[in-house]
Amino acid sequence: MNRHNAIVSALGKEALEWITTHFRKSTTLMDVPEKLLRRLACVDITIRDYQRDSDSIAAIALLTFAYKMGGKTQIPHHGPRDILLLKVLCKGELERREKGTGNMNPFWLSPVYELITGEVGERIRKASILKGGHKRGENHGD
């Protein structure tokens, strides 16, 4: 199997086609196809071997395009937070579609690449994931 076919197989033909032909600077969450939103919303952020999960590969591909559009460089140790942000955004958009609600949050009208690479993404990448002062490696009976 050549490299191109391996990428198509891992990512999925529809997702690859949409990301490479329809994902633009003007693309908002409302423009993302539902099938792709569902894949991105169900990414398991706890796994460490993203290359074995086609939904994770789709998330990484979309994030890579977003960073390129934003003129920024991806930083590997921010990858899990970027994937988490994308997952939350996609879940929110699916919920908005299912409930038929309007755009309550002005960020919903922002381009996806700005949400990832702009102020929202920067805040997520700087935020402490662990709350309550717990330090990594401590056992709190959770």
Image (cartoon, rainbow, N blue to C red):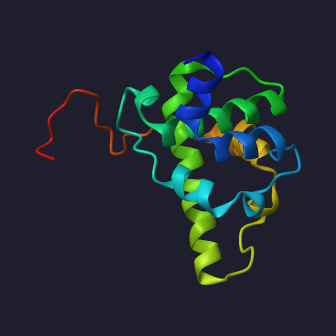
**Could one spot residue 103 in this view of the protein?**
yes
Q: Nearer the viewer, residue 103 or 47?
A: 47
The residue under the point 37% across, 40% down is 130
Residue under the point 74% across and 46% down: 18
Query: Is 34 drawn above or below residue 40 in the view shown?
Result: below
Query: Residue reaching furthest front?
Result: 1
**Quarter location, residue 60:** top right
Q: Residue at x 59, y 47 (%)?
A: 86
* Residue at the outermost left position: 141
Q: Would you say residue 125 is visible in this rendering?
A: no
Q: Position of residue 73 (x, y in %)?
A: 72, 20
Say whether residue 111 is left or right of residue 2: right
Q: Residue furthest top?
A: 2
Please identify the quadrant where the N terminus is shown. top right
Q: Quadrant of residue 50?
A: top left
- Left or right relative to 51: residue 123: right
Residue 128 rendering spot, x and y as whole percentages: 46, 37
In the figure, 44 relative to 36: above or below? above
x then y, percent, for residue 118: 76, 39
Q: Indicate the position of residue 81 as horizontal and vertical percent values.
A: 52, 36
Number of numbered callouts drawn: 0
Among all residues in the image, which is located at the extreme right? 26
Asked whether, in this view, residue 25 is left or right of residue 81, the answer is right
Q: What's the residue at 11%, 44% (across, down)?
A: 141
